[in-house]
Image (cartoon, rainbow, N blue to C red):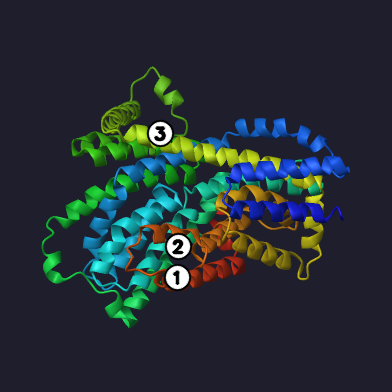
Amino acid sequence: MSPEILPLLLFLVICLVLLLGYPVAFSLGGTALAFAWFGILTGTFDTAFLEALPNRLYGIMDNKTLIAVPLFVFMGVMLERSRVAENLLDTMAILFGPMRGGLGISVTVVGMLLAASTGIVGATVVTMGLLSLPTMLRRHYDPGISSGIICAAGTLGQIIPPSIVLVLLGDVLSASYQQAQLMQGIYSPETVSVGDLFVGAIVPGLLLVMLYLSYVVVVSLYRPEAVPPIPQEEREQEKGLLLRVMMVLMPPLLLIIAVLGSILGGLATPTEAAGVGAVGALMLAGYRLNNRAALPVLAGLTGFVALLLLRWRFGSLGPLIESPQPSLLLVAVLLSCAAVLWGVVVALRVVRTSGVLGEVMSQTTRITSMVFMIFIGASLFSLVFRGFGGDVVVTELLTNLPGGVIGAMLVVMLVMFLLGFILDFIEITFVVVPIVGPILLAMGLDPVWLGVMIAINLQTSFLTPPFGFSLFYLRGVAPASVSTAAIYRGVIPFILIQLLMLGMLAYWPELATWLPDQVYGD
């Protein structure tokens, strides 16, 4: 057997094992070890590659960027269990109800807010499917259009920060970027961070939301019977709408400002911002579970924002706090800290007594363990793949394609899109990106642009029939009256919008690179 065939055969066998339903982490590690054993017996594999595994594992344990993963997962699960989506959907539906397509606009806006609050795709699609699909069908919305809107809005968590996808992609691309520079003979390599990817994804993510909303508006103009408004007599039953909108929107918006604002303002790393988000989600859950906690929670979130603004205006707050001379600024800092502490203590007591805290901690542990086990299995796969010369085979394949870097990029995007039918984004991020990332980056591609392109591409594969994960999530909670064909039909326009966004991003890379340049001054 030709040595060049072994790495490609390894990749193919892993895909087949995953299709059989075996756990991802153990499929990656077990298949890689089996191939390594075969390579040792045939003299085609050097055991020195396996000796590097302990260093790889220690690198995972010592990676401070990955601390953001359990924190963002905690944030997302806490918001999911605290019925934030339910209140947002109800309120937005009343606000936009008088419009044709108002419920579709509401679902899209709530999807954007949940994406900026949680970053967990599966939970968002399931939650919105359970809450909004029956309402849309009861209002005589077209089942296909309703399903498409829910699936598309639910996948916004792939691209809008703080996204778990972007956290993992940022860490992998950082290592790939440094490796690419070393391949080019640059021994003082530049770095790319998760924060760069967060900032780079904001403009494409918001443009995607605008395109989704534009589609709903177009449908309301040309097919008004498919997206009817809420009847007038039902709208008149709602009193004090403005106050309700403020009370429902203010806490999530403050949380989003605290998390993304701290990153955009250079006040916190994504890991630190994840800590802010986790504590903010805890306070928001306390408010949602017990209305009597509204005052301390709003005070705590306001204190968070105030501390961030003070740090942005005056830099480090340490000298100010340690100063022996009292001042209004010192009083403001102390009051803000006291407000945060008050909100945390009250919220913690509420979520603990309600039983939500234990459920959230358990779910966070399970998801985080899964991510890191996949990371370990992917590290073992990567070592064995390189031991068989797989990186050399892929490099030669991509560099010899017609069209140069454009041809290589097109092939990689197509392969990732197709793999998205059978693999989750975590497997693709940990298995595929470390292989192709250094090669593409060595060809001169911008790492932030590449990361955003990959994220949108994976988001598109989440929507594409017949294997898109979002379609399975919605099918699992949709009523029997909604056929699978209707779900497939409904997502097709959104797939075209996704492809349009990819084309726009390919033609104007500045959509992803302009804001990071402005924020970080690179």
Residue occupying image coordinates x 26% and y 59%: 92
Nearer the observer: mark 3 or 1; the answer is: 1
| Three-letter residue code for mark 3 | Met
Label 1 secondary element: helix
Q: Are marks 2 and 1 in contact (CB under 8 Å)?
A: yes
Label 2 secondary element: helix
| Three-letter residue code for mark 2 | Leu
Q: Which mark is residue 471?
A: 2
Where 114 falls versus 383 (above or below)? below
N-term mark: 3 or 1: 3
Residue 274 at least partly seen? no
Left or right side of 106 for 94: left
Where 229 falls versus 249 (above or below)? below
- Of the pair 187 and 33, the residue shown nearer to us: 33
Image quarter hosting the N terminus: bottom right
* Mark 2 → mark 3, Cα distance in angstroms: 28 Å
